[in-house]
Each structure stands twice: as structure tokens, then as C-alpha cells.
Amino acid sequence: MRHFRTYLGDVIWVSGQRAYIDIPRGNYLRRLILKVYGTFTLAGGAASGTVRSEAPATILENVNVVGNDFGNIKAFDGTGLFLSTKMHSHVVFPVLTGDGSEATHPILGVFTIDFAQPRKMNIRPADTFLDSRRFSSLRLELNFATNWRDAMYSENDRTESAASGGVRVHAEYETPHGNFGEPLIYQQIMLTKSVVAASTAFRFPLPVNFTYKNMILSAQNKAAGGQYTGNDAIITSYDLEFNANRYPIGDDNFIMRQYLDCLDHEFNAIHAGANFNMFDLDGMIKESIVTLNGSNLDLVMVVTNPAGDDEIRAYCGVLVRWPMGLRGEVCAPVASQARAFGTARKVRALA
């Protein structure tokens, strides 16, 4: 196979816009690369607030990769995009966010939507290449935040103006060959549950009939008049319960897990409010947690309830087989273009 990267187009930020860009088909897709960029000006007010934990990815409220006859292959918010990039790259990567002061602030962050497993931890990353030939349509959908001030900071009261920028999209592929075999689909799904009271048995249900490769947890607190940001005080510890048995995580301390994340992923700093759980530590897909025909899968947590609104988000990385209607079938590549939903405005035509 031969690796190559191609530019798909720019989706320009418009307040609250929902837009998509078609993903060219005909090869195996390794990952999408999203460069979030731009500048905006803040003036007046009295409070710079604090930078949100996953800025600047938080200018994206929703990120989805959608294939026909399958649905969401990837589904997360900007927080999930940031944390998924960190998990797959195994680094603390640089971002530009500004500090919320009265000034013109640049923003910059490069994020990835990964289909192939990380080369740093997996024996066969190619097992989950996305065979784009099997779809008659494949696209990246983006929902932009209403404004950059609240997307970037919590409790900033300045006035925003002159926001300009967007998302530049690249795709990385491998050319297919006839002896590759039948890959799996590496799907990522987002689940959210509010925490309204302290509890020693807070249950967070997860879907069964999946093979779980990894799971990211993000505990988020929204202060009065502010925005959600990562918070280490919400989750104290947790178990993973499958079919009423505690397996394979038992009484995992949240803060201890953050330090283990630094060891396991080679991070040089913990990430506020986040835990990264890998179920295949030897990099073999067969070590993933199989929940087929299971009755229940739950996170059972000890939680607190800091002032404000508290919620827990789970970003589950699961492995699924291709639906029967898409197995072994391929389609010819077609011309693609990006446009805003509900309009005929062309963002960038692709050959």
C-alpha cells in the first residue's frame, strides 16, 4: 500500500453554522486532520475568565463522520475531538488560545479523527483502516459554536468582535490492494449524563453488543454564568460492571488514573477532568472487551457535586464489523464538494 495525504477544503466559521464537507472515496482512510484557525478581538468588560480545558477545539459543538447505510462512524463534541487526538497521538500538543484579555487573539490547533489505530501502541494499525470504497456517500459534518468568547473561555465578560477563521481539512489515505482482508470499523460514540447529587453508586450505562477498545472519561463543571470545563473534583473513583460483575476496572481512583495516563501515554502533564482507559494494553485488538449478548455494562462511580452544573461525558472507542449490506462491496470514487446545510453555497469543489 502507498500512503498519501490530500487537502479537502476549508469550512469557514459562521456563527452557529452547521456545515459538511464530502470525503473523497476510493481508498483506505487512515485519518482526517482538522486545523482549527483564526483570530478574534475582545474588548471592554472586567473579567478575562479562564481558558476552557479543550480549547480551541471547543469552537466545534459537534463533529461527525457519517457514511451512508451506517450512520455516525465518529460522533463527538469539540472536547471529545481534543481528547481523542491526545489519546491517539500520545503527546501533549501545542495550541493557541489567547488569554481572554483586551486584545486580538489568534487561535490554532491541529486535531485528528483517527480510523487506523495508533502506530505507537498497536501491532496492526491497518486492521481498522476505513474502506471508503464501500460508501456511496461519506462526509465530515461540523457544527460551529455561536461565538468564540464562550467557546474558548469560561466566565469571560468582554465583548467579542471580528471573529474570522475556520477549519482546514486534510485526509490521509492508503491505496488498497487485493490481499488486505476484511477490516473492522473503529467507531467512536459520545454519551453524557448529568450529576445532580453526590453519590457512592452513580451509574453511567454504556451500550452492550460492542467490542470496546478504549474509553475516555471527561468530568465537566459549568460555573454560574460560565461554560463547561474539565474538573478533577467530580469523579472520585469508579468500577466497570459487566453482567453484574466488576470487570475489568475495580475501584479505579480518578486522580491516580490521571498519573497512570502520563505513564501509559507518555504525557508530560495530566489533563483536567480526563481519564484515558485503554483495554488492549499490549496493542492487540483481541484484548478488547467483548460485550456481545451482554445484559448490562455500567460505570459505577463515586461522585461529588461541586457548585454549578456537573456532567460526565464518555467517549467510547468500539470495534464493529461492517453491516451485511456493505461487506465486500465497493463503489467508484466520485467528485466531492463542501457546502453549508440548506444552501447551494460551494465551499470548495474537489476533483
Image (cartoon, grey):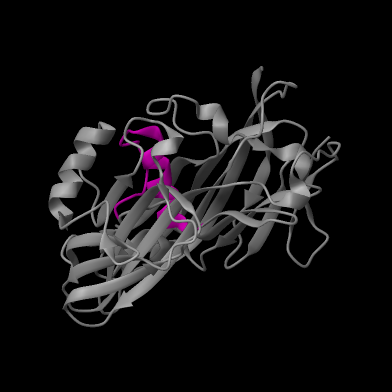
Q: Residue lying farthest bottom?
A: 197
In the rendered image, the quadrant that contains the N terminus is top right
Q: Residue lying farthest top?
A: 2
Q: Is residue 96 magenta?
A: yes
Residue 349 vs residue 217, the one in the foreground? 217
Is residue 44 visible in the rendered structure shown here? no
Q: Which residues are magenta?
A: 76-99
Indicate whether 169 appears above or below 237: above
The tally of labels here is 0
Residue 163 vs residue 298, the one in the foreground? 298
Residue in the picture at 39% in, 33% down: 89
Residue 57 coordinates in the image, percent (x, y):
44, 52
Indicate whether 108 appears above or below 80: above
Res 4 quadrant in image? top right
Q: Is residue 181 left or right of residue 31?
A: right
In the rendered image, the quadrant that contains the C terminus is top right
Q: Is residue 148 magenta?
A: no
Res 312 quadrant in image? bottom left
Residue 187 coordinates in the image, percent (x, y):
54, 50
Residue 39 coordinates in the image, percent (x, y):
47, 49
Residue 157 vs residue 281, the one in the foreground? 281
Residue 181 coordinates in the image, percent (x, y):
67, 28
Residue in the picture at 46% in, 64% down: 207
Residue in the picture at 33% in, 70% down: 204
Residue in the picture at 57% in, 66% down: 15
Is residue 167 visible in the rendered structure shown here? yes
